[in-house]
Structure formats: C-alpha cells, structure tokens
Amino acid sequence: MDDQAGWREATWRGVRMAQGVITLGMVVLAFLAFDDITTDNATSFTFEYAFLLVIAIWSLILGVSLVAMKHFFAGGVSVLVLAAGVWGQRSVGPGTIPSWEPGYVATVAAHAWFLALALWLLVSGLMPGRRGSARRRASARNQG
C-alpha cells in the first residue's frame, strides 16, 4: 500500500510539472502574440488569434483539472481570470499602449496570474507533497 501511495504522489507531481511547463510555454506564446498584435502594422492577425484561442482552451482545461484535483482556489481563480482576459482582449489591438483601461488591466492580470500559476505548478511538482504524506500517515493510523 505504501508503494502505491508513493507511486501516486510521484505521478501527481509529474502531472503538476507537465502542467507547469505547458502553462509557462503558453504564457510566453500569449505574450508574444499580444506583442505582435499591438506592435505590428499587419491588417490581419489570424495566426495570433488562433494561437490565443488554443491558449484559452488550455487555460480552461487547466482550471477545470485543478478543481478536479481539489485545488479549488487555483482552479476557480484560473477560470475567472481567463474569462476576464477573454473579455479584456477585445480592447487590445494594433497601437494599444499600456493604460489603466479595465480591458487592458484584465489582459495583463491574466498574463500575471497564469505566469504565477505556472511557477507554482513547477515548484509544487519539484517538491514532495505534504498533503499526500499526511494522508498516508492518517491511513496508516487507521489501519494499525
């Protein structure tokens, strides 16, 4: 039983690491897409918006999976911040400059949240979880 619990903890640590790496990559790609949209003189940004759609889908999947893993705060905030970022994206276009406009702030906040979330996932994937250890100890006490 102890081997199975250790294997399960190692698996979840690997999942968090993978989520962290993917999310970090998505944050970088989102930043690059928004940078291209705001600084380029092109007439169409189909590729960038398609990328942002894929990033939004990943972010939604991540938020829901965090809730499923009982990380209710991180998952719930992720879904709310994603919704705010999608809403705010409408105000970001060619020639947009940094401002306190609510749409711009929502977009920047989404970038900041998902960057922090990616770092949290990476760190939690590197460190052994206390929650799993506490569950194993409680289970051992109940069995013995």
Image: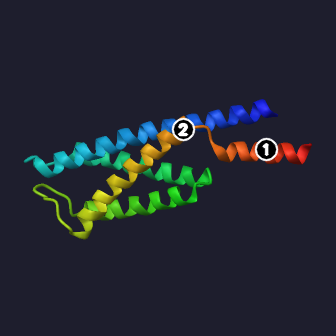
Quarter of the image for the C terminus: give it. Answer: top right
41 to the left or right of 14? left
- SS at mark 2 in the image: helix
Q: Residue at x 63, y 42 (%)?
A: 129
Q: Quadrant of residue 118?
A: top left
Measured in 3D between alpha carbons, the distance from the residue under mark 2 to the one under mark 1, in whole angstroms, is 21 Å
Q: Which mark is residue 18?
A: none
* Residue 36, image x, y percentages: 17, 45
Classify mark 1: helix, strand or loop.
helix
In this rendering, the label closer to the viewer, 2 or 1: 1
Above-or-below relation of 72 to 16: below
Residue type at tag 1: Arg
Which percent across, then down, holds residue 92?
20, 59
- Which residue is the site of mark 2? 125
Mark 1 highlights which residue? 137
- Mark 2 / mark 1, whichever is N-terminal: 2
